[in-house]
Amino acid sequence: MNDSAYTTESTAAAQRDRDLDDPMVTVENLKKHFPLFEGIFQKKAGEVRAVDGVSFSIAEGETFGLVGESGSGKTTTGRSMLRLTEPTSGRVEIDGQNVVDLSDGELKRFRRNMQIVHQDPASSLNPRHRVKSIIEAPLKIHDYGDSEARLERVEELLDMVDLPREFMYRYPGQLSGGQKQRVGIARAVALNPKFVVLDEPTSALDVSVQARIINILEEIQDEFGITYLFITHDLSLLKNVADRIGVMYLGRLVEVGDVDSVFGSPQHPYSRALLSAISTISEEDELAKPDRITLDGEVPDPREKPSGCAFRSRCAHEFDACAVEEPELYDRGPDQVSRCFLHDDRFEEGAEWE
Amino acid sequence: MADPILEVKNLHVHFETHDGTAEVINGIDFAIDRGETAALVGETGCGKSVTVKSIMGLLPSATIPEGEIRYKGEDVLSLSDAERHSRRGKEMSMIMQDPMTSLNPVLTVGEQMMDVLKWQGRPRLSLSKLVRDALSTGAKAEHRKRAIEMLGEVEISAPERVFESYPVELSGGMRQRVLIAIALLSEPDLLIADEPGTALDVTTEAKVLDLLDELVEERDTSVLYITHDLGVAREVSDRINVMYAGEIVEQAPTADLFANPQHPYTRGLLESIPTLSTGIGDGIEGHLPDYTNPPAGCRFADRCPHAEPDCHEAYPYPRQTGPDHATACHLFDGLPARERHESLAAERVDIGTAPWLSAGGDTHSGDAPGDISADGGTDQ
Ligand SMILES: Nc1ncnc2c1ncn2[C@@H]1O[C@H](COP(=O)(O)OP(=O)(O)OP(=O)(O)O)[C@@H](O)[C@H]1O
Ligand SMILES: Nc1ncnc2c1ncn2[C@@H]1O[C@H](COP(=O)(O)OP(=O)(O)OP(=O)(O)O)[C@@H](O)[C@H]1O
Ligand code: SF4
Ligand code: SF4
Ligand SMILES: [Mg+2]
Ligand SMILES: [Mg+2]
């Protein structure tokens, strides 16, 4: 072996394997099905399989990004992992603890380690509480210092999320959309938890404030080794914050891999379509991204998923096999898997798919 | 502005807060023509929602010490609450920034949509249950069909299921589209959309924007579109109002604003648009000023790379810098855009001209956004 590039690469891969051998977060075959009821007797009339067998792991101090169209099950995945909604089945291990098995009391204690920034900041803040007591709540529950220490911490957190300290005395109704979102972030990181679900945490923020908040999130990640699940539909943002990403479609992950591989060479037809739609303003970027692929058809109703590959109804490459069974995840690189029959040697259709 | 549907003149909005009076909106003026889409763009906390909530009369805790809001020529600030209420819906309709707080959690999406169709333009007197009972079956079936169609138009893939769902049973992006559908159902003459695309991916957002466009074309609807993203504003609007700390610092037709951005804040915003190649960027350094103790002069002075001592003292009233372009910055000459500033204009503050415009100044022109230097290539 003459070139050092090879060694570096394999060392990096080995490092990754080690980290992922002992991940901070492991999700195995997670499912969340919501029953649908009908009529005055509320008879069960089917179900929405919002999350339908999702598996991935996140190494300590890493950021795992989750993308996918609206309604694909991103929020439900995050919320089920923290048991804010009870998962139907599956296994979620956070810091060596299977969260799904915890009793209510244990769960309450364990919450110190896992927090969430909700997607809808307005409805996640109690309108009758001042900002101070909202941010202080987790500190109080988990016996963080005396009232003076807590006040100090609240001030520190407000500084961190770029809000004036006087905002402590405001009610959520007196804040702008982006200000509420930052109160939600301050509350989530108050105790330096081990794992945080960030559900569209900067959607209401302009570039300047977003950049500062992302920097802060990264700083505390480095300092305390916090692990993030970062949900966003903003692909340019994801490219910059995530170490690894998962692409979600109708409750399933269709592609998982390290961010450079997935952005550099997306393997699944759905990932390719998603990436081609990134909006850009500069011409350079227009050149740098793949030609725009428009997705035909609509996202199917999650009650009536197509047989075989769920993406089939919108895939330009569909062929016979796709209707018969669902593809497994195929290895497409050292850290990249994709759920598509085009990767299968048994079929000639995949021949020109690189 | 031949026939504006909405005119806002010298609007001031204040709030009482724990640490004193917050002078949030400080004398803004703008107008929207019939059939026009205007954008209001600015950073988080700059006063976009406060502006539009004052137009809708949705700010009970605010005081409006000065200003006029004219809708179809009528001063809405002098109307009673009931009169203003009767103008919501058919006349003016608003897509609120917080989907969950503006949807009723105990009614299904369908019930909320049927209400809109039933009570279009009429004062709301009874509970929604009575409303539903009062509907004749024929009209009801038709309304249902129309509502489900509208859900489909905003790209909701299972419209029947969503119609029967409660808001908590929907994803964030679905809720946002339900709000859009409800606002469109009432076929308003003026549609105010407060950050309607934040929970949507680009493809869906683009389709929703097309839908708005169609509506504008078909019904001559006027739209006020609020966003913190200049890129989105560029796509949707005919005209842009750039807001900073409760003031409109620049207004111009969209093409003009991008070809010739003038205010240092606008230019900062343009420079900080993230690209795939540059990463998330840093944005503009610094913070919004404290509204309870706002600066006397230019509210942007603390963050402006071109600030001179005079900027901190003298109010940079908006001035006419082109036939349809106004900029509130001392770097620009021009007659005051508003009559009320004529006396201020008498004592012009001279801080020179914008460096990116000064002749022969080649130090900045290279990286100025939207730069259209005419002498490219000729070196003298
Ligand atoms: N409590 C619930 N009851 C019934 N269905 C639900 C419930 N919560 C979510 N769903 C359904 O599950 C699916 C996935 O929703 P989820 O909120 O996870 O989507 P998402 O990927 O976060 O989308 P978005 O980007 O729009 O936020 C949707 O079809 C939604 O309607
Ligand atoms: N009821 C209120 N009492 C006191 N201050 C308020 C009130 N409502 C808004 N403000 C303040 O007015 C300023 C402008 O708020 P506004 O909601 O208009 O911002 P925005 O431009 O819509 O921002 P965002 O993009 O974050 O939604 C903010 O600093 C906010 O804290
Ligand atoms: S399995 Fe078939 S339908 Fe599914 S993504 Fe691959 S080619 Fe398309
Ligand atoms: S008035 Fe002065 S401080 Fe304000 S934007 Fe213009 S140059 Fe900058
Ligand atoms: Mg969501
Ligand atoms: Mg707002």
Image (spheres, helix red, strand yellow):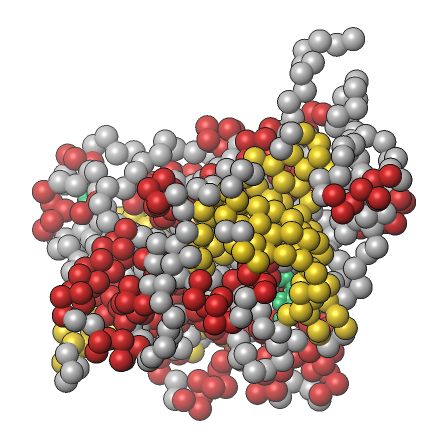
* Rendering quarter of residue A305: bottom left
The residue that appears at 61% across and 52% down in the rendered structure is B8
Number of dots carrying numbers? 0
The percent coordinates of residue A12 (x first, y second) are 50, 48
Viewer-proximal residue among A343 and A291: A291
Q: Residue at x 84, y 44 (%)?
A: B344
User: Height in image: B156 above or below B3?
Assistant: below
Quadrant of the image containing the C terminus of chain A: top left
Residue pictured at 59% horizontal, 63% vertical: B77
Q: Quadrant of residue B291?
A: bottom right
**Residue A341 appears in which quarter of the rendering?**
top left
In x, y percent, where is residue A215? 63, 55
Camera sees residue A186? no
Q: Nearer the viewer, residue A278 or B267?
A: B267
Q: Is residue A60 left or right of residue A223?
A: left
- Residue visible at 65% across and 85% down? A144
Percent position of residue B321, x then y = 71, 32
**Is A323 situated above or below B177?**
above
Using residue B327 as the reference point, say whether residue B177 is left or right of it.
Answer: left
Residue B79 visible to an observer of this rendering: yes
Is residue B64 positioned above or below A351 on the image? below
Residue B65's spot in the image, x, y percent? 71, 65
